[in-house]
Every structure is written in structure tokens, then in C-alpha cells.
Amino acid sequence: MKSEPHVSIRTYALVFLALLVLTGLTTAIAFLDLGGSINTMVALAIAVGKALLVILYFMHVRYSDKLTWVFAAAGFFWLLILIGGTMDDVLTRPQLPPSTASVPAQDYPR
Amino acid sequence: MSKVEPFQAHHFDDVEQQHEASWLGMWVFLATEVMFFGGMFAGYFVYRHWYLQAFAAASNHLDVLLGGINTAVLICSSFTVALAVHSAETDRRKPLIAFLLLTIVLGLVFLGIKFYEYHTKFEEHLVPGSSFSFEVSLARPAEIFFSFYFAMTGMHALHMIIGIGLMTALIFQARRGRFSSFYYTPVELTGLYWHFVDIVWIFLFPLLYLLGRHL
């Protein structure tokens, strides 16, 4: 199918530079102590930003029809359920009241 | 009824429908790949939560410099793939072949560095198994970290090897003149695959190499 180039070389180059800068940034920030889980949050936020740049520009999703958006988003939506649902369980286990069952619940690992 | 092109398969009404079917099919495949790697990521998050200290200590045995260089190499290769697709879109065969070749070279550089890292881990007895050795109080959970490390980077490397094979096939087809600005779907879809593999690494790098520096 005949088509015009989706994205200009200039746009590709800008995205490429942004990805390299973000890689440097996330590495530099890893050596700063932001305290507790903030380091994790920042690193994951930068990774999500980089992934979005790749998906939107390198993978042309920004220039694609709505159906492609749905297909691309579906994978990540299910990933969110997978990880969110799992961590929802794992993170809240310590908050449960002690079991009253006669058989002791298996201790979760430390 | 539009003109039937030689590259149109008989079960499609026209080339646009054929292209859309291929394009969406690739996205469905990539969604399954997200789930495939997602299972390992979910497992990683659970065990990282349970064994935070051991994961940090084990993560500090990875080489941030090599991991960072490999991240940059992979981003460069995504850029060259994007330029290869652009060359196909604009009907330029020589640049298409050149950018595909460059992508393969960058992919091999990545795998070479990865091989060197694996080699170092063997020498340092950080490969899970009977010869694994680590600070005694953290040894078992550190072994779990390295199991995730080898499983995730190993599956990622396997995807790179497959990608390099696909690129090689594309080069042969491009040399035979199979692609033009009218038909370059295989180039486009292989590009999607390569970018996906890049995205997996974009998450693996901070989670495995960086998050142990500060918790």
C-alpha cells in the first residue's frame, strides 16, 4: 500500500536524542539517594516515558487509527491487571488480622 | 474493485485490507509478548518486595556501566530500524539494506556485551546452582534475584537473536527487490518487533541494574 512516510527523520532524531538523555538521567538519578521508594518511582516513571516515546513515534502509534490504539493499549491494560492484582495481594497481606483458623496459616517469606 | 497487485494474497479484498490485517495481527502478537514478559516482571516485583535487601545487594553486583552502554546501543538500534522503515517508505533500497545491516551490527554488539557480563557472573559464582556463592545471610534470596536476572535477560537475548535472524532475511529479500514504497509490510512489522524488544530492555535496565543503588 502506497503511503507517505509516517514520521520525518527529524522527528526520529529528536526522539532518539530524548531516549539517550533519559537513559543518562535515570542512571544518574539512581546514584542519588531520594529516600525509600522514590528512587523506584522515578526510575519507573522515566522507563514508562521512554516506552511511550518508542511506542508513539518509532512504532507509529501516534499516527495510527483508533483500532491500533485499542490493540496497543490492551496489552498494557492487562499487564496492569496482572501486576496490580498481584501486588494488591502481596502488599496488603501484613494488614490482615491474624488468622483464627486452627491450622496456622503458612507464614509468608521474609 | 481495485487493481490486484502481485503481492496481494487472494483472500484479501485489496492491499489496504491486507496491510491492516498484518499490522493488527502483529499488535496482537506483541500484546501476547507483553503478557509473556509481564509474568516474569510480576514475579520479580513480588520477590523484590519480599527480599528487598538481598535484591539490592545482588543488584549491586551488576555492572551499571555495561548495562547503560547496552541500553544506549539498543536505543541506537531502534533508531536505525526506524530509519530502515523510513527508507522503505521512501523507496530507497540501498539505505534500507545499510540500516538493516547497521541494526544487526548493533544487535551483535549488545549480545557481545551481554555475553561478557554472563561470563563475569560465572567467574564470580553468581550463577544460581550448586556453585552459587554469596554473603551467607542473603545467599538464598540473592540466588532468586540472579534467577530472575538470567531468566529475564536470557529471554530478552533470545528475542534479540530471533530479531537478528529476521533482519538477515529482510536483507536478502531487499536485495532481490521485494520491497518498495507500495509494499514493505515485513520491514514495518519486523521494526515493530525490534522496538518491542527495545522496550522490554528499557524496563529491565532500571529494575535489574539501577534499583539496588538506593532503596
Image: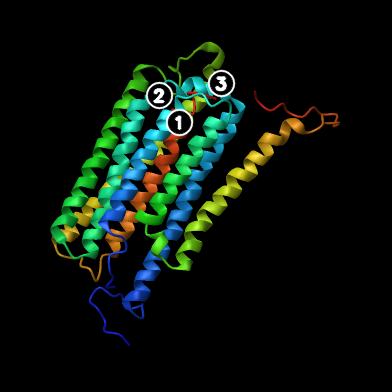
Which amino acid type is marked by label 3?
A: Gln
Give the farthest residue toward the top: B136
Q: Amino acid at mark 2?
A: Leu
Q: Quadrant of the C terminus of chain A?
A: top right
Query: On screen, A73 above or below A22?
Result: below
Camera-side residue of B212 and A19:
A19
Confirm whether residue B44 shows in the render.
Answer: no
Point out residue A35 in the picture as x, y percentages from the top left corner: 57, 25
**Could you tell me which residue is drawn at 17 percent across and 60 percent down?**
B174
Report the chain holding disc 2.
B
**Same subunit, tags 1 and 3:** yes
Q: Is residue B136 left or right of residue B64?
A: right
- Residue B46 placement (x, y as % from top left): 59, 34
For the point 55% across and 37% down, the residue is B43
**Mark 1 crowd level (few <14, some 14–19, many ≥20, 10 Å Cα):** many
Quadrant in the picture for the N terminus of chain A: bottom left
**Looking at the image, can residue B167 be seen?**
yes
Q: Quadrant of residue B4?
A: bottom left
Q: Are marks 2 and 1 in contact (CB under 8 Å)?
A: yes
| Helix, strand or loop for disc 3 | helix
Residue for badge 3: B53
How far is the residue under mark 3 from the one under mark 2? Answer: 15 Å
Chain at tag 3: B
Q: Are marks 3 and 2 on the same chain?
A: yes
Residue indicated by mark 1: B208
What secondary structure is found at the residue carrying circle 1? helix
Image point 50% across, 12% down: which residue?
B135
Label 2 and label 1: CA atoms lie apart by 8 Å
Q: Is residue A3 left or right of residue B102?
A: right
Q: Position of residue B205 (x, y in %)?
A: 41, 34
User: Please, what is the three-letter code of the amino acid marked with disc 1?
Assistant: Leu
Task: Report the residue marked by disc 2.
Answer: B62
